[in-house]
């Protein structure tokens, strides 16, 4: 008897897929068409679906949040239009952190060494005053430490140290950043 082909099986439970379907409908009908300045409305919708958001979060209407129930933001967080947060595991965004246009926080992959090709995921942590620049990517399990900058189009494959600027593929430390802390 042959085993079940992992490539053809869903990676998520039926209840999870149903929850994401309902969120997808709310996203398409209520979140995405909202006007850019309606940050409180979008925060309300995200909270309705389980997100934890501090005050003054600016999540723009063309940002894609895969699973609001796995999103935790402190105060004054910005997620720009075109940014994607793929979060089967928790994504944490610290106070005054920024995720710029078309940035990608990728919280999952597949175990390519396992014949069943199962989904694997790990949390992502973007700490206070950190900035993930436009078109930059943060891989699962990575921490972007306080004040770190991941430059345009760069890919963070490992943790980034506090108050440094990283660039490239994979991202490498290129210089220090002046701390905003007094």
Image (cartoon, rainbow, N blue to C red):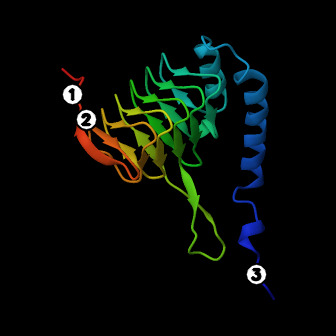
Is 179 above or below relative to 144? above
Q: Secondary structure at mark 3?
A: loop
Which one is nearer the viewer's eye here, 153 or 76?
153
Q: Secondary structure at mark 1?
A: loop
Q: Earlier in the sequence, mark 3 or mark 2?
A: 3
* Residue 66 x, y percent position in the rendering: 64, 40
Q: Earlier in the sequence, mark 3 or mark 1?
A: 3
The residue indicated by pointer 2 is 163
* Residue 168 x, y percent position in the rendering: 38, 47
Is 47 above or below relative to 173? above
In the image, farthest residue toward the top: 37
Is 88 above or below relative to 77? below
Closer to viewer: mark 3 or mark 2: 2
Q: CA distance from mark 3 to mark 1?
A: 56 Å
How many C-alpha atoms fall within 10 Å of the one at disc 2: few (<14), some, or many (≥20)? many
How many C-alpha atoms fall within 10 Å of the one at disc 1: few (<14), some, or many (≥20)? few
Which one is nearer the viewer's eye here, 66 or 12?
66
Q: Quadrant of the C terminus?
A: top left
For this view, does 145 lie left or right of residue 51?
left
The residue indicated by pointer 3 is 3
Contact between labelled residues 2 and 1, with CB atoms less than 8 Å apart: yes
Which one is nearer the viewer's eye here, 98 or 25?
98
Q: Which mark is residue 178?
A: 1
> What residue is drawn where x is 58% and y is 15%?
39
Q: Quadrant of the N terminus?
A: bottom right
Q: Earlier in the sequence, mark 1 or mark 2?
A: 2
> What residue is drawn where x is 72% and y is 48%?
16
* Residue 67 x, y percent position in the rendering: 63, 40
Contact between labelled residues 2 and 3, with CB atoms less than 8 Å apart: no
């Amino acid at each position: 008897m042959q085993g079940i082909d992992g490539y053809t099986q869903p990676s998520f439970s039926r209840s999870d897929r149903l929850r994401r379907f309902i969120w997808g409908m709310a996203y398409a009908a209520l979140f995405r068409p909202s006007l850019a300045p309606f940050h409180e409305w979008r925060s309300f919708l995200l909270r309705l679906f389980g997100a934890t958001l501090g005050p003054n979060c600016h999540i723009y209407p063309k940002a894609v949040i895969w699973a609001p129930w796995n999103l935790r933001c402190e105060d004054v967080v910005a997620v720009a239009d075109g940014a994607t947060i793929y979060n089967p595991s928790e994504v944490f965004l610290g106070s005054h952190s920024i995720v710029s246009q078309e940035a990608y926080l990728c919280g999952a992959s597949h175990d390519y060494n396992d014949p069943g090709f199962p989904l694997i995921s790990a949390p992502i942590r973007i700490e206070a005053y950190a900035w993930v620049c436009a078109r930059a990517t943060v891989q699962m399990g990575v921490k972007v430490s306080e004040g770190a900058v991941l430059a345009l189009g760069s890919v963070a494959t490992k943790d980034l140290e506090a108050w440094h600027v990283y660039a490239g593929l994979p991202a490498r430390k290129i210089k220090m950043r002046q701390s905003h802390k007094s």
